Image (spheres, rainbow, N blue to C red):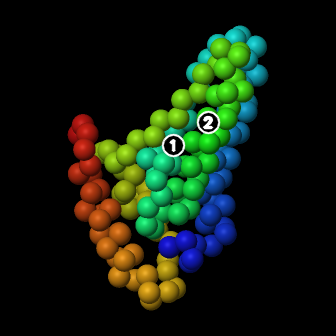
């Protein structure tokens, strides 16, 4: 729950989803601009279009990737460099696996029941999402 998410956890999410994406993109732009061609593909999420319960930090970081991608697409288009943000929903990966997903701890008992339901929803979809096996 956002209320119980530490700034350290928020920064960690942004370091990966936003600043990692921006750093890599910034490193490659000069080469693509110089050759007047290229395609940057940023990985976003359906959560970058619609925030949902229990995912404020993740969704806001993906909203940032969407906006960033749209803005640099306009900056780079005159140089023949194209930008695409891929925004998948649920599909079969280890994304919901205990080795990947990280839930914040809640200190607020008001969130216990909806948070338990949120986790159960995701746990029940782990390795059963649509897509190839």
Q: Is residue 76 above or below residue 114?
A: above
Q: Give how far across and how far down residue 113 sits, in percent.
A: 35, 82
Q: Is residue 80 above or below residue 28?
A: above
Q: Residue furthest top?
A: 35
Q: Give how far across and how far down residue 74 sits, in percent.
A: 67, 27
Q: Is residue 60 above or below residue 41?
A: below
Q: What numbered label is drawn on residue 69?
A: 2
Q: Which residue is mark 1?
A: 44
Q: Is residue 25 above or below residue 53?
A: above
- What's the residue at 39%, 75% (across, down)? 115
Element under disc 2:
helix
Q: Residue furthest bottom?
A: 109
Upstream in sequence: badge 2 or badge 1: 1
Q: Is residue 32 left or right of residue 62?
A: right
Q: CA distance from mark 2 to mark 1?
A: 9 Å
Q: Give how far across and how far down residue 133 sits, in percent.
A: 23, 40
- What's the residue at 71%, 10% (across, down)? 35
Q: Residues within 10 Å of mark 2 (few under 14, many from 20)?
A: many
Q: Residues within 10 Å of mark 1 (few under 14, many from 20)?
A: many
Element under disc 1:
loop
- What's the residue at 63%, 73% (across, down)? 6
């Amino acid at each position: 729950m956002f209320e119980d998410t530490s700034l350290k956890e928020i920064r960690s999410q942004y370091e990966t989803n936003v600043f990692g994406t921006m750093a890599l993109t910034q490193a490659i732009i000069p080469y693509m601009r110089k050759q007047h061609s290229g395609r940057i593909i940023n990985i976003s999420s359906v959560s970058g279009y619609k925030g949902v319960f229990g995912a404020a930090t993740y969704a806001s970081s993906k909203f940032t990737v969407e906006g960033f991608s749209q803005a640099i697409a306009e900056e780079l288009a005159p140089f023949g460099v194209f930008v695409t943000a891929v925004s998948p929903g649920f599909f079969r990966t280890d994304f919901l696996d205990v080795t990947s997903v990280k839930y914040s701890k809640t200190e607020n008992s008001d969130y216990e029941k909806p948070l338990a339901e949120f986790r159960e929803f995701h746990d029940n979809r782990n390795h059963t999402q649509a897509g190839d096996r």
